[in-house]
Image (spheres, rainbow, N blue to C red):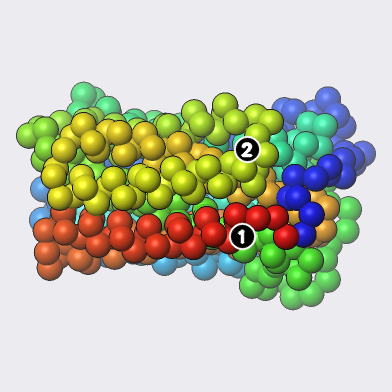
Amino acid sequence: MASAISPMKTVTPTDETPPRSSGRHYYGIGYALTILTLGSNIPTALYGLYRADLGFSPLTQTAIFAVYVATLVPALFLLGPLSDRTGRRPVLLAGLLTGALGAAVLAAAPTTGWLFAGRLLQGLSIGACSAAGAAALLEHVPAGNPRRAARAATVTGAAGCALGPIWAGLAAEYLPLPLVTPYAVFVLALVPALLALWALPDTATTRPRGRLLELPRVPAAIRSVFVRAALPVAASWAVAGLFLSVVPSWTTDLLGTSNLLVGAIAASLMLLCSVTTQLSMRGTDPLTAQRIGLACNLVGVIGLAFVGAASSLGLLLAVTVCVGIGHGLTFAGGMQRVSAAIATGARDTGGAVLAAFFTCAYTGMALSSLAVGLLMNHQSASTAVIEFSIATALVTAIALLLNTRRS
């Protein structure tokens, strides 16, 4: 293929979306995606409180996470392509309202079953909004710049994942009603997002023909670049899943503290490094970014194996920064490559292609969290992390080899 960052066609705004309003809609979509992702990551910092209140086991906690992913991925598969046919706004509004309902269920949860229900609703919400939101950013980005839209899609997702645990840990540790306040403020923050999405115009002038609900498909013309771009993203999100699921409790054990905010910051530091890296990589070749990111991830997961053996806090912090930089370069670079391919060869099926892309990312995160969670039920956390590091290093090395030369 030609370089994935070759000059792109300019997306010309339709009469329904004048240039002056395009920026307003673009930032409104970005805000909505950030807040929704933040809300879906609030439980990360609260599982310790839920376990103390409801008395469930680590295996049950893993199952609660599994329900979230088990609904998120099918929602991505179905609702991303659906937004190509119905428009972005109906899917995004439905996802936002589902996210608010999920937060209400979690805030009121009297039993473990309510936690399962709330996480199921949150999975539906993120599945509905991830691909449709990224496609909407691509359609409303000022000056029709697909690289800028791709960067916004990855930054909003990573920022929400990073800020969710921090906000929940801060609220739970220092504000009243620790299992209610984080969700109540989140729902209030959704009100501006609701207004922004309600005002969103539909830029599509034609609808692809076919069934209303279809599985995502990647057109043959862009399949090669998609595979090469998406595999590194899956590997990087696999490491992110470990940091969101295991590292918080691991860090508090190393420090000998039960402060919820400390564990939340440990979970978020990697993604904060990712966001910082993404914001500073303007003008970087996306393929080069993914190569460097994969190299950083490879060093990081190898270092993670040593952390598992030595339980060194200093080494864990160094690995966290390295993995965060790698995640930012890999995720943003992959999104830019896929967005460029959509802009030049698959514009009518952008929602479907982006659904497949985000499915790869969330599948990587889900598999790592579930695998390590299950391993920890039969052996120590350090042994489970070492085994995870070896497997992820192999996948990362394969992804790096696939991207060592342009085809």
Which of the 4 image quarters holds residue 261?
Answer: top left
Compared with 6, 260 (above or below) is above
Question: In the visual, does 13 lie left or right of 329?
Answer: right
The dot on residue 287 is none
| Residue 130 in sight here | yes
Question: In the visual, does 90 lie left or right of 121?
Answer: right
In terms of depth relative to the viewer, which is nearer, 89 or 280?
Answer: 280
Question: In the visual, does 154 lie left or right of 137?
Answer: left
Answer few, some or many: residues within 10 Å of disc 2's Cα (few below 14, many 20 plus, some between 14 and 19).
many
Q: List x then y, in percent, for residue 193.
A: 58, 35
Residue found at the very far bottom of the displayed protein: 211
Q: List x then y, in percent, for residue 138.
A: 73, 44
| Residue 355 in sight here | no
Compared with 324, 242 (above or below) is below
Q: Earlier in the sequence, mark 2 or mark 1?
A: 2
Q: List x then y, in percent, for residue 13.
A: 87, 39
Question: In the visual, does 208 lie left or right of 261?
Answer: right
Local secondary structure at mark 1:
helix
In terms of depth relative to the viewer, which is nearer, 15 or 34?
Answer: 34
Quadrant of the frame with the C terminus: bottom right
Q: Amino acid at mark 1?
A: Arg
The dot on residue 228 is 1
Give the labeled residue for mark 2: 151
